[in-house]
Image (cartoon, helix red, strand yellow):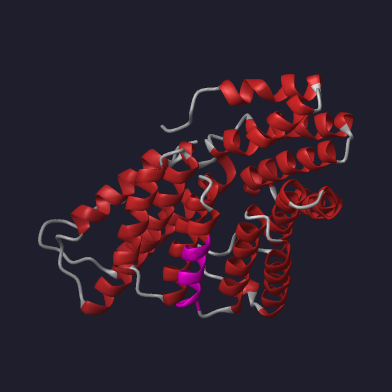
Amino acid sequence: MHQDASPLLPPPHARIGLVHVRHLRAMTAALRAVDYRYGGGSCRTQVQALLSWCDKAFAHSASAAVRREFRRAVAELHALAGWTAFDAGLGGSAHRHFHLALDFAQDEDLVANIRYRMGRVHLHHGGPAEALGMFRLAGLVGTSHHTAAILAANQAWCYAELGQREPALALLGRAHDEFARADVDSAQPWAAFFDVHDLAGITGAVYTTLARTVDVSFARPAITSLGQAVTGYREEMARSRTFALISLSLNHLLEGDADEAAAVAALAVVQSGDILSARTRKKLEPLHAEAGRRRATTLRELITPLLTAPSHAA
């Protein structure tokens, strides 16, 4: 899927106006939607093209108010660039864009959201302690119940990865409490992904991790939460649904139902065909390993091609 990420620059010696800020935000929103639906590999090039336009636009004059709004919009775009790089398997590029986003950001909840995303990179690459530190740092500046819910849920995930049941469950409970107080409908565009369905998805992720690190009995509540997420995710959140299906398959396998695990994994395989996300491979690794341990041949053969497919770093 392609997006025209080349808004017209103002003519030489002209000023940047609010129309350019609105155009930038509209393009960022469109590319964010592509990322959610098709993965970071599908739009990273267009995001980079839009950043190149921003670099040139900075040379033009603007009022103080417009310059402030423009910098905030650029912060949002760099945050998206970091996320698409992360999703494409480019961790170094992701951190570079996140640091640039922090340089431009002025809104405290946006700063918290950027640090949350930096923490997710650490968590994805097997650094739950580092991720936990970043989520805590984000919590120092986050101001909304919605942001607090995102951070508490992700801290719970870190503790689950560390095999610490009590703090994981306590923070998961806090995430649900904060979410109940949040005004989700007025969430900023860069945080709007975290709705009731995504809360169910990350709840399932926490329980899935606890099932692997603490007690397999957590597979049952994981299946319940992930089922809610899979049912609730809209088509434009196809990547999130794919990840939830992979985790759902793993939990069925942990409960000893290899046939159901294979059936759910087949749905994930079909869903992943349109998604250019290097994270899919990482999500499949525990499922593939568990299928090997349990000699679930059908399931293992089903997902092996996805593990050997080329990376989506374009």
- Residue 103 painted magenta: no
At a point 60% along the width and 64% down the height, the residue shown is 155
x and y percentages locating residue 21 in the rendered image: 33, 65
Residue 277 image-quadrant placement: top right
Q: Quadrant of the C terminus?
A: top left
Left or right: where does residue 238 sit relative to residue 65? right
Residue 141 seen: yes
Residue 68 against residue 23 in the figure, above or below: below
Most common secondary structure along the magenta stretch: helix
Residue sitting at x 62%, y 25%: 306
Left or right side of 222 for 257: right
What x and y, as percent, mark residue 233? 71, 51
Q: Where is residue 48, by image quadrant?
A: top left
Judged left or right of residue 19, residue 267 is right
Which residue: 37% across, 57% down?
A: 98
Reply above or below: 196 against 270.
below
Segment colored magenta? 132-142
Foreground pick, 193 / 288: 288
